[in-house]
Amino acid sequence: MKKLFGTGVALVTPFQQDGTIDFKALLKLLRHTAKGVDYYVVMGTTGESVTTSAEEKTAVLDFVRSHNPKNLPIVYGLGGNNTQQVLKTIRETDFSGVTAILSVSPYYNKPSQEGLYQHFKAIADASPVPVILYNVPGRTSSNISAETTLRLAQHKNIIGIKEASGNLEQCMKIAQLKPRDFMLISGDDLLTVSLYAMGGHGVISVLANALPRVFKKVKDQVVAGNYLKASETLFTLLAINGPMYEEANPVGIKQLLREIGICENSVRQPLLPASEALQAKIKKAYQELKK
């Protein structure tokens, strides 16, 4: 899947102040991110998939398909903790123009490793497009172990994993033993260069919503073999990355997008827009970044 090498942006879903989807802002976001990313990730967890309806998800996907300024590949977020419901959604989804799906590990019910394996196997068996696993223990309360990832990597329709465990040892085990064409993708912006260096395929990024050119620069420096320069570029994000998650994702990134004039900072409850303290912190970090 060479077309998915580099930076995927985990697109936010812009909302108007009344809570409805702001498609004008979404178009602005697509045009802005196209300046530096390699593919779009639509309706992932950063897109507030857990608080959008099935109809809204379809509307956003349709909009991205028809307003794709550089005809970039589309990865569609399609996962959950109810295996049968995920399979039903797969049967009912129009996958035209979709390169792959990103399927998050089941949350809350904390399945065993065998349960995780059987869940993703069922999804991969049913999906008409390739599947990228998404491991994010900080949100799901369960970890897809390296052993389970490597077992799933043998499935012909599972092409990669977005690894957001923050566990570099686990990532190294996957990198060491994975099939050559299985994609190891960073799910943490600040670990992008680390995963590139161990043979990874890039990042699915939150900050690329606002700062796509930074991630393009990192990718170009990695491709040129200059990992030191790539790390130095990534270091510029240290101050602004932390505030992105202080009040939960995508609260921080939507505030940053408001700061640069892309969309409102509106989020769906139970999340709330950034507090005044967080707004000030993000404004200061962004001003420092622009210097």
Image: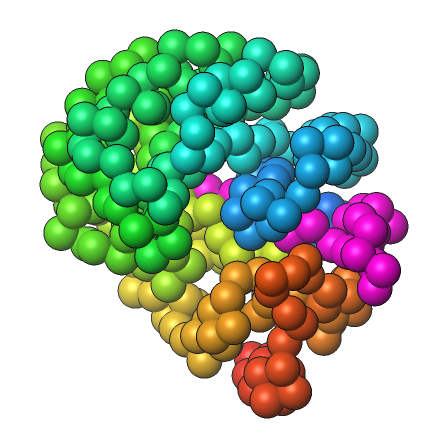
Residue 21 shown in magenta: yes
User: Can you name the residue that lies furthest to the front here?
Assistant: 109
Q: Nearer the viewer, residue 132 or 223?
A: 132
167 is higher (above) or lower (below) than 83 = below
Q: Residue at x 52, y 56 (%)?
A: 206
In which quadrant will I find the C terminus? bottom right
Q: Nearer the viewer, residue 46 or 186?
A: 46
Left-right relation of 192 to 290: left
Q: Nearer the viewer, residue 15 or 199?
A: 15
Quadrant hosting residue 288 = bottom right
Q: Nearer the viewer, residue 235 or 173?
A: 173
Q: Position of residue 171 (x, y in %)?
A: 20, 46
Q: Position of residue 157 (x, y in %)?
A: 37, 15
Q: Position of residue 93 (x, y in %)?
A: 64, 18
State the colouring used for the structure image: rainbow
156 is higher (above) or lower (below) than 89 = above
Q: Position of residue 3 (x, y in %)?
A: 50, 28
Left-right relation of 137 to 75: left
**What is the tally of numbered marks visible in this picture?**
0
Residue 64 visible? The answer is no
Q: Residue at x 60, y 62 (%)?
A: 270
273 is higher (above) or lower (below) than 199 = below
Residue 4 shown in magenta: yes
Residue 250 visible? The answer is yes
Left-right relation of 285 to 120: right
Left-right relation of 140 to 22: left
In which quadrant will I find the N terminus? top left
The residue segment tinted magenta is: 1-28
Q: Residue at x 37, y 37 (%)?
A: 106
Q: Residue at x 45, y 11 (%)?
A: 126
